[in-house]
Image: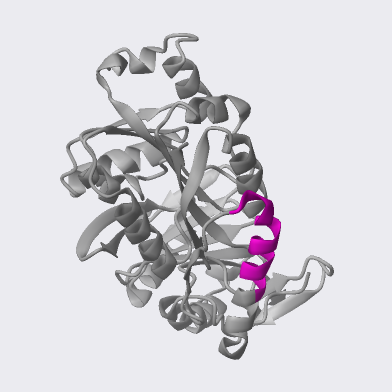
Amino acid sequence: MALPIVDPALYESQLATKVERFLSEAEALELPAPAIFRSPPLHYRLRAEFRIWHDGERLDYAMFAPEQPKVPVLIDSFPAGSQLINHLMPALRQRLQRDPLLRRKLFQVEFLTTLSGEALVTLVYHRRLDESWLEAAGPLRRELGIELIGRSRGQKIVLERDWLTEELEVNGRTYSYQQIENSFTQPNGAINQSMLSWAQEVLGERDDDLLELYCGNGNFTMPLARGFRRVLATEISKTSIASAQLNARRNRVNNVELVRMSSEEISAALNGVRPFRRLAHLDLASYAFRTLLVDPPRAGLDAGTLELAKNFERILYISCNPKTLLENLTALKQTHQARTVALFDQFPYTEHLECGVLLERC
């Protein structure tokens, strides 16, 4: 598959193709007509990474198409990337090109930006970084007004901090998030705000408790906690859990308990299969869980989590893979019915489509 062509003139047709494919594949499930959430047609990606192509003393950003993995496509600008990424790309390239120490054996550049206007750049090398690199990198960080990290095999040098602060508007309220370099964050900020607002609206305000699996840095947790008595949120990544705990304090969310556990482990705990020390401080029996939020990886829900989900009155399922979503919905259709469906164009000009489904017990 070739690199996507980012052309606003093609936006509506590419989205229509994806929606039609989803509707065709989901036809047997007789889902409600979906709400469609469009992405900005340009400058929608807050993250980007490029290989660095060396030609003598010249540097270029490069990407590689899957069908020609050894043939570089040189990149001057990146219209899918945020305006801040496009502002930084030429300035960074020129600055690196002037400094032999900073460009030597530079392999890759990674950009992380936010809707709030912050930027973090990671320079990845095929050599060990020393004090001389650090001395050269400091002025680069100050000149470009960015956070800066140097990486090589087994090495990470952080000049100031390895995280940014993002601010997201959700139904008229602003939420603040720490986003750490090399950890998962939603790539399309505008669509992320749409997803959070939609999720908050369809769940509304409840008098029960929410169990959230795959909570990441608390992206959904923070706004949704306002509608529930209590929330128990789980995530396997230690880094993400630490960020989620910080984000709860930042947003003054006091009704959330965050636990580092996999979906398989929390399913085993709630089904009484085995106890866990990480839950010893909680009285699970005191929770009135009737709502489940899942945002699994592309593989979808495992068999144990699917069985756990059948016990809930309502399930909010966020999916980055329509194929596994539809497989899971087929497994749940004996106990639950889809009430609301939304399609989010998280990755314009690609085949990928993000989905949201609210299911209620039959």
Residue 310: x %, y % from top left: 50, 29
Q: In which quarter of the image is the N terminus?
A: bottom right
Q: Which residue is drawn at 37% across and 18% down?
A: 278
Q: Is residue 329 above or below residue 139?
A: above
- In the picture, residue 78 is in which quadrant? bottom right
Relative to residue 287, is residue 50 drawn left or right? right
Q: Residue at x 19, y 42 (%)?
A: 253
Residue 85: x %, y % from top left: 46, 76
Q: Which of 190 and 26 is in front in this view?
A: 26
Relative to residue 306, is residue 244 drawn left or right? left
Relative to residue 221, is residue 94 drawn left or right? right
| Span shown in magenta | 17-30
Q: Which of 149 and 335 is in front in this view?
A: 335
- In the picture, residue 148 is in which quadrant? bottom left
- In the picture, residue 221 is in which quadrant? top left
Q: Which residue is drawn at 61% across and 68% down?
A: 19
Q: Is residue 235 above or below residue 182?
A: above
